[in-house]
Image (cartoon, helix red, strand yellow):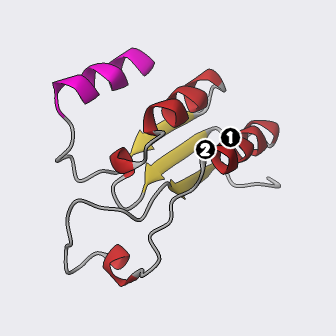
Amino acid sequence: MFKFPLNIEIDLTYKCNYNCLYCRNGLIKERDELSINVIESLINELRTNNIFSVNISGGEPLLHKDFSSIIKSLAENNITWNLTTNGSLIDEKIAKKLKKII
């Protein structure tokens, strides 16, 4: 039996560049995002507890100011990740950055 889940979801931010009627984030009044210190602490805890998969979500996770650093830290700690995004912010620059990290 596992002490911790094998996969978790992290909502990096509630910020979004859309305001979709069906989205639960439209109901959230407070728009804070997780700080890089909190996320780094969480990544250390994930590694320590052998959690090997993370779904990065939000709001729109690409709006988090430390998005690239977060993905890089997950990769450096051998934690696989997938990204739930509306895709509207993915341009050639972002795609190349993600490819480089992978």
Q: Which mark is residue 9?
A: none
Residue at x 74%, y 44% (from the top left corner): 41
Using the numbered discs, state the Cα–Cα distance from disc 1 to disc 2 in whole angstroms. 6 Å
Residue 42 lies in the magenta-colored region: no
Can residue 53 be seen at all in this image of the molecule?
yes
Residue at x 23%, y 59% (from the top left corner): 17
Q: Secondary structure at mark 1?
A: helix
On the image, numbered disc 2 is attached to which residue? 36
Q: From the viewer's perspective, is the residue at label 1 or at label 2 nearer? A: 2
Q: In the image, what residue type sits under mark 2?
A: Ile
Q: Position of residue 52 (x, y in %)?
A: 64, 38
Labels 1 and 2 touching (C-beta < 8 A): yes
Q: Secondary structure at mark 2?
A: helix
Residue at x 21%, y 37% (from the top left corner): 90
On the image, numbered disc 1 is attached to which residue? 40
The quadrant of the image that shows the C terminus is top left
Q: Is residue 53 left or right of residue 6?
A: left
Q: Toward the viewer: 49 or 28? A: 28
Can residue 102 be seen at all in this image of the molecule?
no
The quadrant of the image that shows the N terminus is bottom right
- Is residue 90 shown above or below 29? above
Q: Which residues are magenta?
A: 91-101
Q: In the image, what residue type sits under mark 1?
A: Glu
The image quarter containing residue 79 is: top right
